[in-house]
Image (cartoon, rainbow, N blue to C red):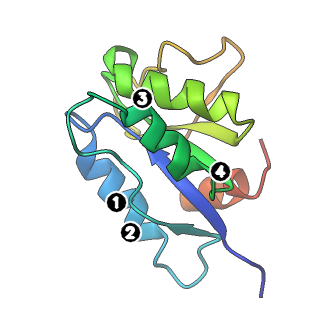
C-alpha cells in the first residue's frame, strides 16, 4: 500500500465551508490517496495566524486551494497560497463547484489552472499529475 499524501486545504471559510467538508470526507474513502487533517484557521485573521499556517504546512505534502465563487476576495486564501509557494509546497487549484464560475486567489499565477473536481481527477492531482 502506498503512503497517503498529507493535504492542507485552503478555502474561503465564509463561502465554501460545505465544499471543504465534502472534500475532507473524500479522504475517508478506502481508495483515497490522501489524508486530511483540519488545518484551517478558524480564528479571525489577527496576530500570528500566518505563522500558525506556516507551522501547519511544515508536515504536509500537497496544498489544495479550493476555489469558489468569491475566492478572488478571500485574503486568507491568497496569503495561504503565498505561504505554500514560499515553502515550495506542491499545490493545485480545485473548482469547488461544477456549476458555478470559480475564481482564483489573487496570488495565483496566470499559469495556474483551476481543475475540475472529480474523484479520478482529484486522485491524479494529489499524485502530482498536473
Residue at screen point 55% across, 15% down:
107
Number of residues whose C-alpha sits closer than 10 Å to that of mark 4, classed few (under 14), some (14–19) or many (20 or more): many
Lower sequence index among marks 3 and 1: 1
Residue at screen point 63% across, 51% down:
58
The reply to whether discs 4 and 3 touch (Cβ–Cβ < 8 Å) is: no
Numbered tag placed on residue 22 in the rendering = 1
- Give the residue number, with chain letter if any, for mark 2: 25
Measuring from the top left, give residue 79's x and y in whole percent. 47, 24
* Camera-nearest residue between 19 and 11: 11
Number of residues whose C-alpha sits closer than 10 Å to that of mark 2, classed few (under 14), some (14–19) or many (20 or more): few
- Give the residue number, with chain letter if any, for mark 3: 77
Label 3, secondary structure: give it. Answer: helix
Lower sequence index among marks 2 and 4: 2
Left or right: 74, with 87 as reference point: left
Q: Quadrant of the N terminus?
A: bottom right
Numbered tag placed on residue 62 in the rendering = 4
Label 4, secondary structure: give it. Answer: strand
Lower sequence index among marks 4 and 1: 1
Number of residues whose C-alpha sits closer than 10 Å to that of mark 3, classed few (under 14), some (14–19) or many (20 or more): many
Lower sequence index among marks 2 and 3: 2
Task: Please identify, in this view, whether the residue under mark 2 or under mark 4 is nearer the observer.
Answer: 4
Left or right: 7, with 109 as reference point: left
Measuring from the top left, give residue 19's x and y in whole percent. 32, 49
The reply to whether discs 4 and 1 touch (Cβ–Cβ < 8 Å) is: no
Residue 95 seen: no
Query: Could you give the CA–CA distance between mark 4 and mark 3, rounded to whole angstroms?
Result: 15 Å
Query: Could you give the CA–CA distance between mark 3 and mark 1, rounded to whole angstroms?
Result: 18 Å
The reply to whether discs 3 and 1 touch (Cβ–Cβ < 8 Å) is: no
Label 1, secondary structure: give it. Answer: helix
Residue 125 seen: yes
Picture quadrant where residue 41 is located: top left
Query: Could you give the CA–CA distance between mark 2 and mark 3, rounded to whole angstroms?
Result: 20 Å
Amino acid at each position: 500500500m502506498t503512503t497517503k499524501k498529507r493535504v492542507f486545504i485552503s478555502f474561503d471559510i465564509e463561502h465554501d465551508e460545505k465544499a471543504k467538508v465534502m472534500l475532507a470526507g473524500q479522504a475517508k474513502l478506502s481508495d483515497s490517496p490522501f489524508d486530511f487533517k483540519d488545518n484551517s484557521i478558524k480564528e479571525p485573521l489577527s496576530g500570528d495566524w500566518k505563522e500558525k499556517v506556516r507551522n501547519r504546512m511544515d508536515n504536509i505534502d500537497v496544498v489544495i486551494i479550493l476555489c469558489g465563487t468569491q475566492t478572488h476576495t478571500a485574503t486568507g486564501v491568497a496569503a495561504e497560497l503565498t505561504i505554500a509557494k514560499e515553502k515550495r509546497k506542491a499545490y493545485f487549484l480545485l473548482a469547488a463547484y461544477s456549476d458555478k464560475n470559480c475564481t482564483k486567489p489573487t496570488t495565483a499565477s496566470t499559469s495556474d489552472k483551476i481543475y475540475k473536481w472529480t474523484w479520478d481527477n482529484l486522485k491524479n492531482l494529489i499524485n502530482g499529475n498536473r
